[in-house]
Amino acid sequence: MTAQPTLEDAYAACRAIARREARNFYYAFVALPRPRRNAICAIYAFMRKADDLSDDETLTRDERRSNIQAWQAAWRAASAGGETSDPVFVAVRDATGRFAIPLDLLDELVTGTTMDLTESPDDSPHTYTTFTDLYRYCYLVASVVGLVCIRIFGYSDPRAEKLAEETGIAFQLTNILRDVAEDAARNRVYLPLDELAARRVSVESLLHRAPGAPPTANERALLAGVADRTESYYRSARKLLFLIDRESRPALWVLVSIYRALLHRIRRADYDVFTHRAAVPMAQKFAILGAGMACMAWTRLTV
């Protein structure tokens, strides 16, 4: 068995994963003090591995479920103090202890990544009937991450927990809007079926559209309604900002600012998420990060 990596090497490996894969998240990580940044990168690396195991479409659903179960069992053994050669497990074990992160939150995170592996009859598309159903999915894959992150950010007011949950919903709904076409190509529709019906949009029109076809008026109205709901959840993010430790606020501000910028780009494109994938330009991300870093420096000077 390969030797267990040192804690320093384990965190370095997680930072490398976050730098390579995190995209929007990594810019926020940079605005954190190093111990908190290390912990956030560890949690991200854990989440990334769970997602990768779930999304490996070279394997059957049964094989993916089996791999996730084996990986989760290995994590549970490591979290109980067992020897492990996995640098992510070493880092996450330290982070959960250092920041009092309940291990059941990580179990919920893994549960969320496996929801897409639920068998659908006759290869029918993966869908959600109502927003309540979709909210549960968003909670498991995004709100749980928020509940982990605020423990790393630091907070004492219990109101922070519900606000972190709703901030996660805002982020995931933004992702869902951006990825409508990509998800449809994987036989997944995350827009609630009752809302599609209310706007007279069929699942088939999302799954089997002509290449380069822009959204119809009904599809734009559907997506605009989702964007309005998403914006309402971002109000929770603004409230959360003032309930976490001062030195963590710039990081959360950077993250929220980048995600809201993505939502605004979808709006400015008049909800055409079919002919191109919305993204925040690198220059805008760097500008947001620069403002966050300046705020972090000011915070350190005035604490």
Image (cartoon, rainbow, N blue to C red):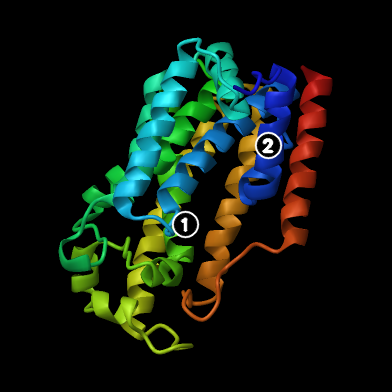
Q: Give how far across and how far down residue 42 sits, in percent.
A: 60, 30
**Residue 53, horizontal then vertical, whole percent:** 45, 45
Choose between 145 and 122: the one closer to the eye.
122
**Reading the chain from its start, which is encountered first: label 2 or label 1?**
2
Please give left or right for residue 123 compared with residue 48 in the image.
left
In the rendered image, the quadrant that contains the C terminus is top right
Q: Name the outermost residue toward the front.
A: 1
Q: Position of residue 146 (x, y in %)?
A: 48, 34
Q: State whether residue 223 appears in this view.
A: yes
Count neighbours of disc 2 (C-alpha within 10 A) and say few if under 14, some if 14 to 19, many if 20 or more: many
Q: Which of these two is toward me, 92 or 261?
A: 92
> Is disc 1 placed on a helix, strand or loop?
helix
Q: Is residue 26 left or right of residue 147?
A: right
Look at 70% across and 35% down and name the residue there: 15
**Looking at the image, which residue is at 40% across and 89% down?**
210
Residue position for label 2: 29
- For image coordinates 37% across by 47% down, the residue present is 64
The amino acid marked with disc number 1 is Thr
Q: Is residue 219 left or right of residue 283?
A: left
Residue situated in front as seen by the camera: 31 or 69 = 69
Q: In the picture shown, does residue 6 fall above or below 289?
A: above
- Real-space Cα distance between discs 2 and 1? 19 Å
Q: Residues within 10 Å of mark 1 (few under 14, many from 20)?
A: many
Q: Which residue is mark 1?
A: 174
The amino acid type of the residue labelled 2 equals Phe
Mark 2 or 1, closer to the camera: 2
Q: Which mark is residue 228?
A: none
